[in-house]
Structures are given as structure tokens and as C-alpha cells.
Image (cartoon, helix red, strand yellow):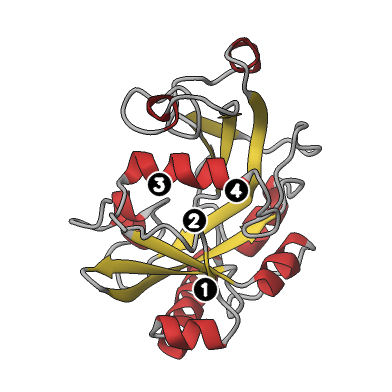
């Protein structure tokens, strides 16, 4: 099957996820987060604001990176990951960047427990027919406040993010409205508000999944180790 690019990735992820993958990264929510978290918005993404570094933050961040690196060493291949209970997200669609998710770890994180040796997902980069592990993803529920997110990963290093303002396409919507540069629906779509989504016949979901943070242990700078996604962290890795 042909690989899809970034726009196709986010659109396909959104379209399939809301139909039934409730605990892959976390569940979809139709209402606002019960605890406010100061954030900034960029497109269909909401991100925590950067915090000033405090004593102990560097040690905590380094410990998480070391744990993530050990996890990658423990599960260097897809076969090893699958034997440990990690399953491919969107199994029918080959992607440039693949997430293999452990549902037990996802539930553990959702319920408030953070173990850097238990990432919700392992992240693999596709290179031809092979997959190379390049990072991990940790998650938290939508109800987590800023202090809780900071307690897991210091906000002076990591940027927690979540996907927002998703308009699910109505049944029968043209393919061009769901995929590609002119899409109206999905995470890459032009629709950002409930009114616009209702008018287009779609279903508006303010937040899909929960909070997530990526770690790319083999990168060379803090900015790239803690980048929001591979597109921003690694040259040549954009889908």
C-alpha cells in the first residue's frame, strides 16, 4: 500500500481514531478540560507554555531521556515491540512515522501513573521496507493540570500537546474534503470551529485523545530531543 504524507497521516488518524480507538493514546472528549492548562494554539494543536528551568529540572529531564533510550534498546525492532504488547496504530496504513502503542501503559498513564520505562507508544521511522526505532511517547489524561504535567515531564524541557478542534467528516464527504492540501475536515482541515463544522454537516470534537509528549533520545540538542514531532526534530524525517 502506498505511504501517505503528513496531511494524509493526520487526516487518516483523525478519521479512524474517533470511530473506535478510544484508548490508543487516550479517549476523545466532547467537553472542555475540567482543569485549565495555560497553552498556545497552532493549527489543530494545543501545546503547554514553556516554563523557566527550576533546580532539579535538568536531572529529571535527563533521567527521562535515559529511560527512553533504555526502552528503545529493549525494543529495537517491531518484532520485539509486538512481543511486549505494543500494537501498530492504524495497522492498515503504512506511514513514514509509525506509533506502536501499548494499551495497558496507555491506561496506566490515563489513570495518573507515570513510569518513564512504560511509554504509551514506541515511535519507528520507516526507511524503505524497514522500520527503525527513533523515539517514545508518554501520555496523560485531558484532566491533568499544569502541575501534574510538569511533575511528569518538566515543562522547561518537554512540551505537552494534544490535538484539538477536530471536525469529523460526514458520511459520503468527498475524498478531497478529508485528505490533501484543500481538506476541510480532520486535523489538517480548514474547519476549526463548531459552528463551521455543524454547517458542513460534520461532528465537532474539541479534543481528541489526551496530553502527549515525545522524546527523541538520539538527537543532539534539548530542542530536538524534546521536539513536539519528528517533522520538527529530525532533518529528512518529515513524512
Q: Is residue 176 left or right of residue 234?
A: right
Q: Image height check: is 124 above or below 3? A: below
Looking at the image, which residue is at 30% across and 46% down?
5
Q: Quadrant of residue 98?
A: bottom left
The residue carrying mark 4 is 17
- What is the x, y in percent for residue 152? 64, 63
The residue carrying mark 1 is 64
The residue carrying mark 3 is 9
Q: Earlier in the sequence, mark 2 or mark 1?
A: 1
Q: Are marks 2 and 1 in contact (CB under 8 Å)?
A: yes
Q: Earlier in the sequence, mark 2 or mark 4?
A: 4
Residue furthest to the front: 172
Q: Earlier in the sequence, mark 3 or mark 4?
A: 3
Q: Is residue 37 left or right of residue 134?
A: right
Looking at the image, which residue is at 55% across and 40% down?
15
Q: Are marks 2 and 4 in contact (CB under 8 Å)?
A: no
Q: Earlier in the sequence, mark 2 or mark 3?
A: 3
Q: How many marks?
A: 4
CA separation in Å, label 2 and label 4: 25 Å
Q: Are marks 1 and 4 in contact (CB under 8 Å)?
A: no
Q: Secondary structure at mark 4?
A: helix
CA separation in Å, label 1 and label 4: 28 Å
- What is the x, y in percent for residue 58? 48, 67
Q: Image height check: is 140 above or below 45? A: below
Q: Secondary structure at mark 3?
A: helix
Amino acid at each position: 500500500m502506498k505511504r501517505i504524507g503528513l496531511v494524509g497521516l493526520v487526516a487518516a488518524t483523525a478519521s479512524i481514531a474517533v470511530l473506535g480507538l478510544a484508548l490508543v493514546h487516550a479517549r476523545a472528549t466532547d467537553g472542555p478540560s475540567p482543569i485549565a492548562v495555560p497553552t498556545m494554539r497552532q493549527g489543530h494543536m494545543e501545546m503547554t507554555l514553556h516554563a523557566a528551568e527550576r533546580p532539579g529540572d535538568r536531572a529529571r529531564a535527563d533521567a527521562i531521556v535515559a529511560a527512553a533510550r533504555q526502552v528503545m534498546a529493549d525494543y529495537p525492532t517491531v518484532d520485539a515491540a509486538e512481543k511486549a504488547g505494543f500494537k501498530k496504530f492504524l495497522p492498515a496504513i503504512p506511514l513514514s512515522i509509525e506509533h506502536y502503542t501499548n494499551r495497558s501503559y496507555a491506561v496506566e498513564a490515563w489513570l495518573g501513573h507515570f513510569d518513564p520505562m512504560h511509554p504509551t507508544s514506541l515511535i519507528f521511522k520507516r526507511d524503505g521496507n524497514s522500520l527503525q526505532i527513533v523515539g517514545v511517547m508518554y501520555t496523560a489524561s485531558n484532566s491533568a493540570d499544569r502541575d501534574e504535567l510538569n511533575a511528569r515531564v518538566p515543562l522547561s524541557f518537554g512540551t505537552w500537546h494534544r490535538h484539538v478542534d477536530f471536525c469529523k467528516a460526514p458520511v459520503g464527504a468527498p475524498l478531497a474534503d478529508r485528505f490533501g492540501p484543500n481538506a476541510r475536515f480532520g486535523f489538517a482541515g480548514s474547519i476549526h470551529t463548531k459552528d463551521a463544522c455543524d454547517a458542513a454537516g460534520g461532528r465537532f470534537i474539541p479534543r481528541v485523545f489526551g496530553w502527549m509528549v515525545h522524546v527523541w533520545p538520539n538527537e543532539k540538542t534539548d530542542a530536538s530531543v524534546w521536539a513536539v514531532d519528528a517533522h520538527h526534530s529530525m532533518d529528512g524525517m518529515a513524512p
